[in-house]
Image (tube, grey):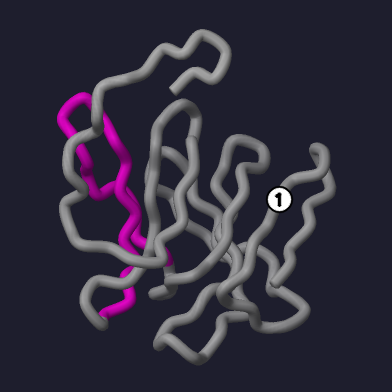
Amino acid sequence: MDVESGETCADLADFPVENFGAVGANLNGTPIVCGGLYSTEPLQTCYKFTDAGWQEFASMNEKRHFAAGIMYKNKFHVFGGTYDGTSRLQTSEIISIDGGVEYGPELPEAVGYHAITSINSTVSILSG
């Protein structure tokens, strides 16, 4: 919904799998969703929404759910998360719209169930 005009969009197509604890973003104008939990299985798949509906487009290096992410330099940066519900990750990953995935910087400590927000073009706050 556009909060200024009140205009609304049509609903998106159903997501292809049940998912809980995923992280998402608007990557270069394309809605994406990565990771999460299907039943009891952590996921590493990333999906993007196109005119044809939701499509797999990338696979993260690690399975992760309850991660946090931000956009930086037209790429989606995903930080931490858990891979088995209790063990937290200290890694980050950088995802490009073309499906490229690479490790990002290692975090000072492992985190899960957290949040991140950008303050400006070079500073973000990760908390939780």
28 relative position to 33: left or right: right
Please tell me whether residue 120 belongs to the stretch shown in magenta: no
Who's the residue at 52% across and 60% down the image?
102
State whether the magenta stretch is mostly helix, strand or loop.
Answer: strand
On whether residue 42 falls in the magenta region, the answer is yes
For label 1, the crowd category at 10 Å Cα-Cα, with few meaning under 14, some 14 to 19 and many 20 or more, is some
Name the one closer to the observer, 112 or 78.
112
Considering depth in this image, is 10 or 91 the residue closer to the camera? Answer: 10
Quadrant of the rendering where the N terminus is positioned: top left
Question: Residue at label 1?
Answer: 117
Q: Amino acid at mark 1?
A: Thr
State the quadrant of the C terminus: bottom right
- State the image coordinates of residue 34 (x, y, percent, origin top left): 39, 57
Q: Residue at x 80, y 38 (%)?
A: 121
User: With 13 as the anchor, is 128 left or right in this view?
Assistant: right
Tell me the residue at 48%/36% (across/down): 26
Q: Is residue 6 or residue 79 the one in the foreground?
A: 6
Range shown magenta = 41-60
